[in-house]
Image: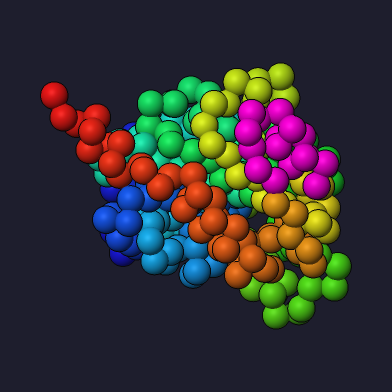
Amino acid sequence: MPYTTVEGENLFYSVNRGKFERGLPPLVLVHGAGGTYLHWPPDLRHLPDAPAYALDLPGHGRSEGRARDTIEAYSDVVYGFVRSLSLPPVVIMGHSMGGAIAQDFALRHRDLLAGLALVGTGARLRVAKSILDGLRKDYPATARMIGEWAHASHPSEKMLKLYVQRLLEVPAEVTYDDFVACNRFDLMQDVSRIDVPTLVVCGQEDRLTPPKYCSYLAANIPGAELVLVPAAGHMVMLEQPEEVTAAVERFLHSTFAGYQRDIESAKRP
């Protein structure tokens, strides 16, 4: 698995180069608070028709460096990541905190963006005081609580255990800074200025970012498409990976059929 250097830190990422000749833009997968690239299911990380890059943000997973405590700072990291790989304009798919990063990217780094896929996120991400306090006082117990809230009702013990295990592999101070960044985030008055094709995906049983959050995004981002996934909560892409992957593939194929042709035309004098 490769690394790249951004802001002096070595960042780990998985890559599936797909088939550039199919003409679809690269997909950059950005995980949520306390996550890693493994929060994206294999089907999404290995799309047959589009290059896919799933990174570990600084301080997460196999990446070096320190966590950030603002969404803007993480957005700059993702911008540096895209530039470090010399990618053409990308589709950023962000989950939860990653969706906040994607929205900020769209507003401040439009030059490297082709589209957005926003999953289980909102234009504002207020965090319960019990989570912020718990991350400081009892990380294991709070990780279990977050895990229970992050899934649809009655998740399998195996799925819940794996989620908590992966969350605890991320240092408590990193997860805390992530949630602080989320709590500070607010683009309620700004998302209407996003001007790229956008897909919004939400689990119908999401308790952390309820469907009304995604409905707000879909209603206020011009032309955005909303997909509500039954029998899924906040971790919708892991709970219902086939449905989410199918929605992303439909979005990419229907929206970017001429992407590669347009890129090549832009290169000609």
Is residue 61 something that shows in the picture? yes
**Range of magenta residues:** 211-226
| 237 relative position to 149: left or right | left
Residue 238 at x, y percent in the picture: 63, 66
Residue 246 position, x and y percent, is 57, 63
Q: Is residue 35 magenta?
A: no
Q: Position of residue 244 (x, y in %)?
A: 62, 61
User: Is residue 219 found inside the magenta-colored segment of the image?
Assistant: yes
Residue 153 falls in which quadrant of the image?
Answer: bottom right
Q: In the image, is residue 112 above or below residue 250?
A: above
Write the residue at 40% across / 47% down.
257
Front residue of this view, candidates 208 and 114:
114
Count of marks placed on residues? 0
- Furthest toward the left, the residue is 269
Q: What type of secondary structure mainly makes up the magenta span?
A: helix
Relative side of 104 to 261, left or right: right
